[in-house]
Amino acid sequence: MHILYIHQHFATPNSASGTRSFVFSKKLLEAGHKVTILTSEGYLPQEYRRLQHFEVEGIQVVNIRSGYTLRLSFWKRVLSFLKFVIGAVREGMRAPADLVFATSTPLTVAIPALVMKFMRNIPFVFELRDLWPDVTVELGLIKNRMLIFLARYLEKTAYRSADRIVCISDGICQNVAAPPKKKITIPTGCDLHAFQAGKDTRWKKESGIKEKALFVFTGAIGEANAPDYLIEAARILQVDGQHDIAIALIGAGSAKERVKSLKVSYMLENVYLYDPLPKNLIPKVLAAADGGIILHGVSRLYRETAMPNKFFDYIAAGLPVIFNFEGPLRDQILTHQAGFYVDYRKPEELSKTLVMLFENPEIGLKAGLRARRMAEEYFDQEKLAEKFVMTLAEVVTA
């Protein structure tokens, strides 16, 4: 079968972003299927950003240039989403396809998929990585009532029209208003070959980090990721004289400039900021770390449903996870004793946990080993990709 795969933020291993779509597309190719990706330039490696049509390891890619970057204002982002929708409809109507698959966010990727379903009479599978628009409303990013109404109408239409709904977490599946038989959870999973449990401090030394303990925060630095919470925890560490603990943020996002400003205002010497790194360099970073930090902000829904890429990288690398979210994923981490929960309202809990792990490294090492076992048992990316391929095949043959 030929899958028309709509992902506005498609990334390759040379991109500074998650590679779920790349990995799952490769697995589709291995199974004898064909894949055409409709994407935009935002997360593509530099050498592809000006190309309209190209191939990556057998995957056909159509680049619809929409001008999207993480630094865009809200309304400019909306405009870039709409530009992508128009281009995706145009390209999708003439691309070969037996099934259209669209992965959100943004929610607007459902529009070209719905056009393909009804105009070309082909099955439609909708994937949810976040719950839009509810999370953005909770975060205060969308306040316009008409925009909220339209977004919710699109959401309901997509759920009703999809032949199958793939959720990346159980928390998301629990919050999707659709029949249980229509929904399936397929997490992104862990690359157990690229990431290995074991210590290698070279990246830490090369990056000029002199503190004895290093805790990392990789990926998006946006409002949903509680940047003020993290900076406040770092400030508490410095005030308390904990000068042997460093926090490194590797990534980009709408809140990064504010993080830089707060670092200067508080004169924080224990916070290090780095530009995003290609996915294939992240294993080296995590090998130098003593723990991985995942923070979610004031959105209750986001805290209870999100399953970020960094989680899979951390546990694959055998790092203990320090986190402040709730929901099924929290329960799983705590049940397997693979991480440490801190209250999202109390940054002092984060600072205390980092101190505890620094002063008792054996606790972190044991939690990290349990995290790696959890990755191997529940989140093997190869097995999850096979489940994904089977799911799409079942939809086409139904």
Image (spheres, rainbow, N blue to C red):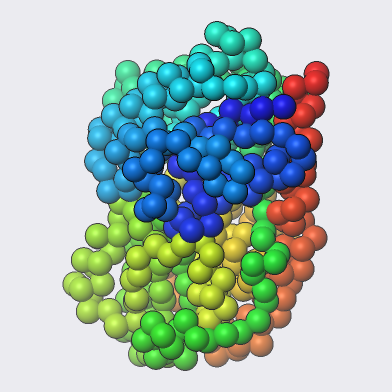
Residue at (40, 68) in percent of width and height: 249
Residue at (51, 37) in percent of width and height: 61
Q: Is residue 220 visible?
A: yes
Q: Nearer the viewer, residue 337 or 392?
A: 392
Residue at (38, 41) in percent of width and height: 51
Residue 212 percent coordinates (x, y):
47, 91
Residue 48 percent coordinates (x, y):
41, 47
Rendered position, 55 above or below 107: below
Q: Nearer the viewer, residue 268 or 33?
A: 33
Point out the image quarter for the N terminus.
top right
Quarter of the view holding residue 32: top right
Q: Is residue 40 left or right of residue 190?
A: left
Residue 238 percent coordinates (x, y):
33, 83
Rendered position, 143 above or below 333: above
Give the total number of marks visible in the rendering.
Answer: 0
Residue 300 percent coordinates (x, y):
49, 45
Q: Is residue 271 left or right of residue 300?
A: left
Point out the image quarter for the C terminus.
top right
Quarter of the view holding residue 346: bottom left
Residue at (59, 22) in percent of width and height: 96
Q: Is residue 20 visible?
A: no
